[in-house]
Image (cartoon, rainbow, N blue to C red):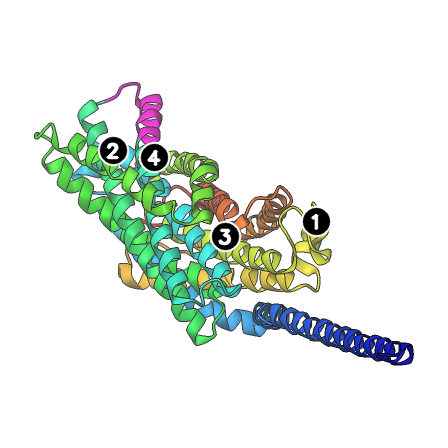
Amino acid sequence: MTGEEVRQRKKEGRSKNGDRSKQRSKSKGKSKHNDRKAVSSEGQDAVLPPQAPQKRQAEEKVAMAKTEEESSVAIGLQVLFPYLLAGLGMVMAGLVLDHVQHWEVFRTITEVFILVPALVGLKGNLEMTLASRLSTASNTGQMDDAREQWRMATCNLALIQVQATVVGLLAAVAAVVLGFISKGHIDLEQAAVLCASSVTTAFIAALSLGLVMIGVVIASRKLGINPDNVATPIAASLGDLITLSLLAGISTALYKYKDISYLSPLVCVLFIVLIPLWVVIAKRSPQIREVLKSGWQPVIVAMSISSIGGLILDKTVTEPDFEGMAVFTPVINGVGGNLVAIQASRISTYLHFWSMPGVLPYKLRQHWPNPCTTFFSSGVNSRSARVLFLLVVPGHLVFLYTITLLQGGHMAVTLTFVLFYLTAALLQVGILLYVADLIVRLMWRKGLDPDNFSIPYLTALGDLLGTGFLALCFRLVILVAGADVKPGN
């Protein structure tokens, strides 16, 4: 082979190698381009799934915007029927209390009257709090999934069974202590009957009303009704009547068999032994687990406040001049607690939508608003406060007429009494609505959920104000109209 041919072959080899390298570089470029395409497509796929929650959040914001645009008429129409229904339930509860106050167990163990506001107040401490908690969860879309509904229902029911058992026992202990302070002695047999009656009543009432509340919230969501407007009034309508009927029946039965010395303590032990079971079930939900740890203070403080109202009731009902007070006590206490629970639940839902715990939204930026801000500003919460306040007089007139009608002339409901009574009711509800605005904002700024912490305080304050103002109302009527006129007798 000549030198010329060797040079020619080397040149051809270099050109082939160059072509191969170019092809390799092109293929690398294509592979890199394809990789980039794959990565971009994967990135798009990764971005796609969160669009569903974003869409849901957008829908929830639109729903809340519609709620914020609720007119006074719309709020009033949604609240009116449950409010009247609740009031009629309280009227029936008042008639029951007016009847059973003459039973032997109420005349012998007068501390049962101290239990009445505390146990009736459990609907504010437990059932209304449950209704508010579930209403907020429903409005924020947390109960749209059937499995989530079941988990929230069982965990919440277990929670209120724990709270009802403990608070029922503490309420009985408080009644015994207040009775000791008043009388100067303790009858252990009567104390055992009181404790067993209180725990049993609290447990059964909490279970039955809890089931009703869960059904009401789920049904309201499906019918497109705001649960905040209907759940708490329905809890109030049934709570007083069921609780008072249970207390009267159970205490009478246990008092009848008081000679069986071990019966009442055995009943208490049985419900106490069940507490660990309810705790295990309740802990399945992280939110409920937190309430189990931190939710005791408002419930116990509220029970203590209600017990003071019960002491006022015990001291007044046993006097002849105040005998008719029993029928009005559940009504004035229940209406005040009912209306303030609606307002607290609405403000809490608003805060959950527009802010994070610890920070107030712009429209509620005042830490300590004055009464004018609460009642006369342009916001939806101020609008609802005005509507609820205006419902007081017509509602109570309906309830007073119903009481007079059902009593068949037994009640001396005079014009003087009606004026004093309506003044007391307006003062009570006005104070409660303003305090609700303060407490809910305070709880939110402290990072606490108002659904769990505000309503117990507010309903207990309503019991104390209602019982105190009603006793003052009776006293003023006697002073103005003379000792011969005894309202309610």
Between 337 and 154, the one lying in front of the other is 154
Q: Quadrant of residue 414?
A: bottom left
Task: Give the distance between the C-alpha atoms of the residues marked 3 and 4, in whole angstroms.
Answer: 26 Å
Chain-order first, disc 2 or disc 4 = 4
Chain-order first, disc 3 or disc 1 = 1
Magenta part of the chain = 173-186
Between 442 and 6, the one lying in front of the other is 6
Chain-order first, disc 3 or disc 4 = 4
Task: Give the distance between the C-alpha atoms of the residues marked 2 and 1, in whole angstroms.
Answer: 43 Å
Q: Residue at x 59, y 63 (%)?
A: 384
The answer to whether 147 is drawn above or below residue 17 in the figure is above
Q: Is residue 212 left or right of residue 57?
A: left
Q: Which residue is the site of mark 4?
A: 171
Asked if disc 2 and disc 4 are in contact, CB closer than 8 Å, the reply is no
Residue 425, which numbered label? 3
Q: How many marks?
A: 4
